[in-house]
C-alpha cells in the first residue's frame, strides 16, 4: 500500500470536525502531531444523534454511494498511544456516542488508511450555530479550500 509512512507505535487518525484545528488537538492529544491533510472520497459530512449532544446534533460522516464526488476534508494526525485513550474519552467512545472506523484517505502523497470517529446514532437533526461555526473555523485553520469552508458556514443550524 502506498501512502504516508508512520511509526508502528502510532495510529493514523483522520479528524473531520473540531479536531481539524491543530491548536485544539495539541490540548486533546499533546503527543500527536499533525501529519497531513486529505479527503474522504465518497463520504459526506452530516449530523445526527441530536438527543446525544448538549447543543443539537453531532458531526459524523456517512458513505455516499449515490454521489461518488462527495468528499470530506480531514486532517491526519499521528496519534500516540498515550493520547488514544484520552481522545476516545473526549469523543465519548466509552459512552457509546462514537465508534472508530478505518477508511481510506486520499492525500497529495497518495492513499493511506486511517481511522475516524463515526456517530452511533441516526442521521438527522441540526447542529447548533456555535458548533457549526467551530467546525468551519477548524476546517479553515487546517487549510480546507475556501468553497468547502463556505459550504460549512452556509449549512442550516
Image (spheres, rainbow, N blue to C red):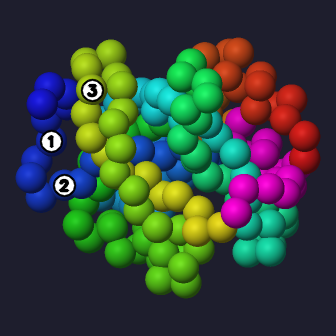
How many labels, in total?
Answer: 3
SS at badge 2: loop
Residue sitting at the far left: 8
If the image is split into quadrants, where does the N terminus sit? Answer: top left
Q: Is 107 left or right of 119, judged from the image as shown?
A: left
Contact between marks 1 and 2 (CB within 8 A): the answer is yes
> Gap in Å between the C-alphas at discs 3 and 1?
13 Å
- Circle 2 packing at 10 Å, graded few (<14), some (14-19), many (20+), is some
Q: Is residue 23 visible?
A: no
Circle 1 residue: 6
Q: Badge 3, how many Cα within 10 Å: few under 14, some, many 20+?
A: some
Of the residues under marks 3 and 1, which one precedes in the sequence? 1
In the depicted view, which residue is nearer to us: 152 or 125? 125
Q: Which of marks 3 and 2 is nearer the N terminus?
A: 2
Residue at the extreme bottom: 95
- Nearest the eye: 25 or 14: 14
Compared to 134, does 121 lie above or below?
A: below
Query: Where are the magenta residues, as a range?
Result: 122-136
Where residue 111 is drawn, which disc sits there? 3
Amino acid at each position: 500500500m502506498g501512502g504516508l509512512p508512520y511509526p508502528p507505535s502510532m495510529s493514523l487518525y483522520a479528524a473531520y470536525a473540531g479536531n481539524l484545528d491543530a491548536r485544539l488537538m495539541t490540548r486533546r492529544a499533546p503527543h500527536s502531531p499533525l501529519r497531513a491533510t486529505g479527503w474522504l472520497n465518497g463520504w459526506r459530512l452530516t449530523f445526527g444523534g441530536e438527543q446525544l449532544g448538549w447543543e443539537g446534533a453531532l458531526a459524523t460522516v456517512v458513505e455516499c454511494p449515490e454521489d461518488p464526488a462527495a468528499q470530506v476534508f480531514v486532517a491526519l494526525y499521528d496519534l500516540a498511544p498515550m493520547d488514544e485513550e484520552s481522545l476516545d474519552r473526549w469523543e465519548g467512545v466509552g459512552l457509546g456516542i462514537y465508534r472508530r472506523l478505518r477508511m481510506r484517505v486520499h492525500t497529495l502523497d497518495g492513499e493511506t488508511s486511517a481511522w475516524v470517529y463515526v456517530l452511533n446514532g441516526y442521521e438527522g437533526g441540526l447542529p447548533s450555530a456555535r458548533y457549526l461555526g467551530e467546525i468551519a473555523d477548524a476546517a479553515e485553520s487546517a487549510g480546507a479550500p475556501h468553497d468547502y469552508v463556505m459550504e460549512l458556514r452556509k449549512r442550516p443550524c
